[in-house]
Amino acid sequence: MTTPAPDAQVVFVGYNAAYLRAIDASVPSGSVVVIEEPDIIRKRELSDAAARFDCLDRIVPASYQQSTEALDLAAELTAVRPVAAVVPGLEYAVPATAALAEKLGLPGATEAAAQALRDKVRLREVTGAAGVRNPRWREVFGPEDILDFAGDGPVVVKPANRQASVGVQLLDSVDAASAARAWERTSSAAEYEQVPDRELAWRFLAEERLQGPEFSVEALVRQGEIIFQNVTAKTVIPGPYPVELGHLLPAPLDEDTQNAFGAAMRALVDATGYRTGILHAEWILTDSGPTLVECAGRCPGDYLIDLNDLAYGTRIRLTLIDLLAGRPVTLPRSAEQTSAIRFLAAGPGTVTEVSGVAEAQELPGVRVVEVDVAAGDEVRPWASSWDRAGHVIATGPDADSTLRRVLDADAAVRITTE
């Protein structure tokens, strides 16, 4: 693995503090430039962000969400220093990242693949046409379309181009009233700090409710070939909002199932025409085999990169920069251990006390205990990934022991609300 030359810069589209923190001591000082929406710079108070990381030279304000304005920066960026790589920092930055990389002649997803990954309607169209297994689906424009698609059966209603489970709902049955409520909740979903204030275009889907365990696949791809792949077992909370409760990787799967996921991922890469970068694909393992839920063209959230690094001994964020710079990379074929995360929950209300953190940190195999709420904070019922109260991470020699360790750590942390 290499790092950017001192005279070159890495451009991130979208500010990702976790990514910058992870690479800060491993890349040259001032070698990173971030492009971010002016509204998001203001909302997230990022005007002084360059002082927070040695690697970060500056944040350049420009529109990139459903906008081509960031492409106009190509000449300005290269006039300062050569650009080694363009990296997607956030979900909404994937299309602009691919377009900017193409304009600069650098490796990337390709614009066509990035557009498919950012819009589930388009993703369903291109992957279904190529034979990738998809649920039955339909684009919807109001509650009548939801009711017409679902009949009285179970259905998933969700935005086609949002992130983090925002607006996703699982309905056991549908009538006129529940269809109207689902449309209102899905179409009015908001992400104040994640999007600019200007009006953006959102699309919506109704899909068949699939039955089976959920998995994600994290893959690194070079020139259309998968060079690293991990399958993660997911746990999702019951109820109408499918927010992830935990992850375990590598998933304990038999050889045939592993091969089925490998074939499904290769078909997905071929169908989208994806070239170089990282993929995070979510699947449900039905009786017919892996069926596609969605796929992102950036580093996954939920600390999955950290879990992969713990299990495989990798540094995937640095490896991704090397891939997008066209440099050679070396990756392991198998994991050294297993890793798991469990997200902390609490009853809705005002936090009165947080306890058990020190005890959890002392448990065998526990690597991280992080609580994101404190006394006086409000805890809401989970409707998206933003509503979780923290997390614990553990490692172990096998899936069973690692799962026990992370559940013990989860049980040790107590968040009291009233």
Image: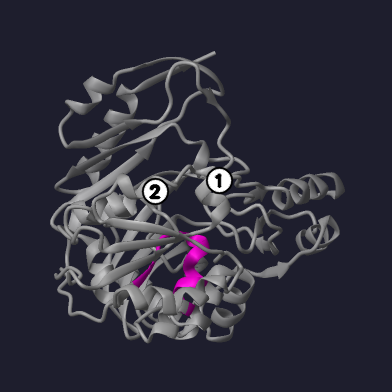
- Disc 2 or 1, which lies upstream in sequence? 1
Q: Amino acid at mark 1?
A: Glu
Residue numbers of the magenta segment: 86-99
Check the image and report above or below for 157 versus 376.
Answer: below
- Report whether residue 322 is seen: yes
Residue contact between numbered discs 2 and 1, judged by CB atoms under 8 Å: no
In the structure shown, which secondary structural element does the residue marked by tag 1 occupy? loop
Q: Which mark is residue 302?
A: 2
User: Count the marks: how many?
Assistant: 2
Q: Neighbour class for label 2 at 10 Å: few (<14), some, many (≥20)? A: some
**Where residue 321 sits: x, y (%)?**
27, 69
Which label number is shown at residue 351?
Answer: none
Is residue 209 placed above or below 226 in the rendered structure?
Answer: above
Residue at 82 percent across and 62 percent down: it is 145
Residue 282, given in percent of the width and then of the height, sits at 46, 62
Categorize mark 1 by other alpha carbons within 10 Å: few (<14), some (14-19), many (20+).
few
Relative image position of residue 43 (x, y in whole percent): 55, 44
Q: Main secondary structure of the magenta part?
A: helix
Residue 223: quadrant of the picture: bottom left
Name the secondary structure under disc 2: loop
